[in-house]
Image (spheres, rainbow, N blue to C red):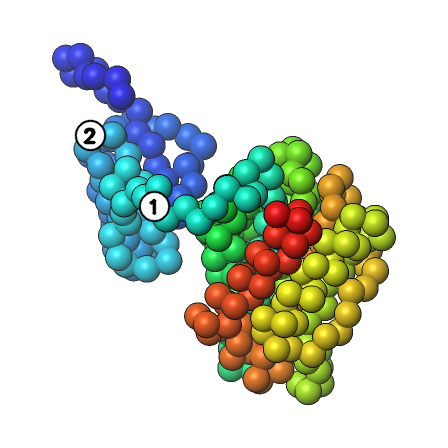
Amino acid sequence: MTKRTGKEEEDMQIIIDGHKVPINPRVSKDLLITLKSIARSLHWGILYDTNRETVYINTKSASVPVPPHERPASSPAEAESNRLAGKTICIDPGHGGSDLGAIGPTGTIEKDNTLAIALLLCDKLEKNGATVIMTRETDRDVSMPDAETEVELGARVDIANGADADIFISIHNDSFTNPTAAGTTTFHYGHPESIRLANCIQKSLVEGLGTRDRGVRFASFFVIRYTKMPAVLVEVAFISNPEEEVVLASIDGRYKAAESIFQGIVKYFKV
């Protein structure tokens, strides 16, 4: 951090939901008052760190944000193994931000379920030595709000390709007009390694969740067609099915889904 000299003004950083705003306005009392007023009226949490000249804003609730440097660091003892060391895995939580995805009978939303499962999976992978690239870590659009579909999906593909990931996994919830439709499906775009990855994850998910096995299938979904590594799109279960909606929205169900995908990844890498 640069020290102040005299009355020299410093730039202020504004971080909203963990993402830095790409401008650095000068520190001013008027700006701080305005930001606090906006946060109060919209029921956002806000914190001004005077030492770092940084404003943290939490748009998800009125709770005060916790700066990254004040969060408890992960203990080395939490690591489970190094079996995935050297592997870079890109996880894509489907939908997000302005794109809700499908909505369940009780109002649960696909974008929330996919993010929750992806974050649990990310934690599990990192504890086993993997480098994890998330296309999103919060409820947001990856490209920009209300972007055209190909622009949004292209941004996700670019993240995976740019990271030179070893594998790509896009997590979704299935949906159908008939609420009795149920089960788990894993899609691939035909590459032999993608098929093998799909089979490993599909088998593990069906065993872990106890869902109907709808099989491994070919599909030309954008994110698995244009990624340059073995890639699959997982439809964990049907959010339109009342029973499976409960699984997708529950803490236990999300944990089982993440654990099952993790076990499928381990089987794929044979570690």
- Which residue lies at the image location 34% right of the left edge and 51% below the top edge? 58
Q: Is residue 50 visible?
A: yes
Q: Which residue is mark 1?
A: 77
The answer to whether the residues at label 1 and label 2 have Cβ atoms under 8 Å apart is: no
Q: Is residue 147 visible?
A: no
Q: CA distance from mark 1 to mark 2?
A: 31 Å
Task: Please provide percent x and percent y for residue 146.
Answer: 61, 53
For label 1, the SS is: helix
Residue 161 shown left or right of residue 77 in the figure: right
User: Is residue 245 placed above or below 43 in the rendered structure?
Assistant: below
Q: Which residue is mark 2?
A: 51
Task: Please provide percent x and percent y for residue 172.
Answer: 63, 63
Residue type at tag 1: Ala
User: Is residue 20 placed above or below 117 in the rendered structure?
Assistant: above
Q: Which mark is nearer the camera, 1 or 2?
A: 1
For the N terminus, the image quarter is: top left
Name, please, the residue furthest toward the top. 5
Residue type at tag 2: Asn
Closest to the observer: 95 or 237? 237
The quadrant in which residue 90 appears is: top right
What mark, if any, has residue 131 been given in the picture? none
* Residue count near mark 1 (Cα–Cα under 10 Å), binned few <14, some 14–19, many ≥20: few
